[in-house]
Image (cartoon, rainbow, N blue to C red):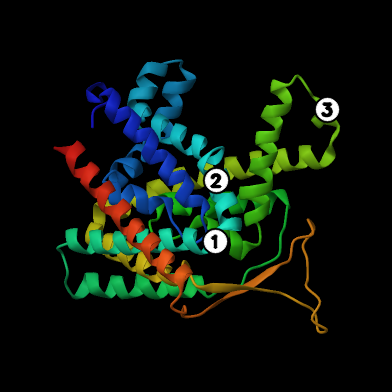
Amino acid sequence: MAENTRTLADKILLVLKGLAMGAANKVPGVSGGVVAFVAGFYEEFIYSLQKVNLKAFKLFINFRWASFFRYINGSFLGLLILGMLISYFSVSKLLDYFLITHELYVWSLFFGMIIGSVVYIARTFKNWNASTLSFLVSGTLAGIAISLLPPSTQNDNLVFVFFCGIIGVSGMTLPGLSGSFILILLGNYVLLLVDSVNTLFDTFIHIFNNDYSFFNDPIHMRLLTVLIVFSVGSLVGMVSLSHLLGYVLKQYKNQTFASIIGFIVGSLGVVWPWKHKIYKSDTVGKLLIDNNGNPILDHFERYFPELNTNTYIALLWIILGIAVVLYLDFIGNKTTK
C-alpha cells in the first residue's frame, strides 16, 4: 500500500500488527512471521526489508532522508517496528507473567493460533502439485526435527550473542520457525529475551528517576552490552534474510509457501499445551543450574490430558486462538478491498 494512502486507522492497525508480531516472536514455538503471513502483509514486509540496501545507504549518508524514507517504505516498517518495541515492554511482560501463572492456557492459545494459521493458509493456497507437496513434507520434517533438538547452556560471549541475533530474528521473516525456540535450543532465551530486555526497561526507569548508578553496576552494563550486540545481530539477520527470501519468493513462490506451511505444521509439537519441563541433572539427581541460578532445560515431555476443568478451559483457549487468526484474516481482507 502506498504510504500517502494510509489512513489513521491503517496506521493504528499496523502498530497493532507489529505488537502481535513482537509478542508472538517472544513465545517459544510461535513465529512472528506467522502473524505477518496470516494478516496478509508478509510479502510487503519482506520486500520492504529488501530495500535496506546500498542505494538506501547512499540516500541516507547524502542527507536525502525523505527519499530514503520513501524508498524503504519507511511508514510501513516504522509503524511495525514501533508495535514490536511496544510489545517488548508491555505485552511481552504480560506474557512472561502469564507463562508463569497460567502456562497451560498460554500454550493453548498459541496452539489454537497455529492451527488457525494452518487452516487459513491451506485454504488460500491453491497451487498443490507434486513439487509443492514435496516441499510441504520437507518443511514439516524440518520443523519436527528442530523441535526435537535438545537445548544448550547459556553463553554470553558477544560473538555468539551476535550470531543468536541473526538466528533469533528468523521467526520474524520465516513463518513457522520460532526464533525464541531457537534461542532456547542455543541456551540464550532467558539471557536475551528476558534478562537483557528487563534490564533495558530498568535502565529507562533509572534515567526517568535521574538515577545513573547503574553505570557502576557491571552486571547491568554487561546485560546492556549483550542486548545491543543482540539487536545489531537481529538487524543484520533481518535484512540479510529478507534479501534471500525476496529472491526465493520471486523465483519459487509456490514452493516457498508450501515449505512455510510445512514449518507451521511441524511447529505444532513445540507448542502442544500439555507438557512437562524436564531439567538436566547430574548422576545423583541434583539439578544443574546456569550462571543465573536457573535450572537448565533439557527437553519437554508431552502427554495427553485428562478430562477435567483445566482441560476444558484450555480447549476454550484453543478455540479462542483459532478465532483470533480468523479475525486477523477478516481484517486483512477488509483492509485490502
Q: CA distance from mark 3 to mark 2?
A: 28 Å
Above or below, comparing residue 307 to residue 37 in the picture: below
Instruction: Where is residue 164? Give x, y as percent.
Output: 60, 53
Q: Give, as a three-letter code, the residue at label 3.
A: Ser
Q: CA distance from mark 1 to mark 3?
A: 36 Å
- Left or right, 113 with respect to 30, comes to left
Q: CA distance from mark 2 to mark 1?
A: 12 Å
- Left or right, 190 with respect to 65, comes to right
Q: Which residue position is annotated with label 1?
A: 103
Q: Which mark is residue 213?
A: 3
Q: Which mark is residue 283?
A: none
Q: Residue at x 79, y 59 (%)?
A: 293
Q: Does the rendering let one see residue 169?
A: no
Foreground label between 3 and 2 = 2
Q: Callout 3 environment at 10 Å: few (<14), some (14 to 19), or many (20+)?
A: few
- Which badge, 1 or 3, comes first in the chain's sequence? 1
Q: Residue at x 52, y 59 (%)?
A: 28
Instruction: Where is residue 281? Give x, y as percent.
Output: 76, 77
Element marked by disc 2: helix
Q: Residue at x 58, y 40 (%)?
A: 232
- Left or right, 183 with respect to 322, comes to right
Q: Does the rendering let one see residue 85?
A: yes
- Which badge, 3 or 2, comes first in the chain's sequence? 2
Element marked by disc 1: helix
Element marked by disc 3: helix
Instruction: Where is residue 309? Give x, y as percent.
Output: 46, 70
Residue 287 occupies quadrant: bottom right
Q: Give, as a three-letter code, the residue at label 1.
A: Glu
Q: Which residue position is annotated with label 2?
A: 94
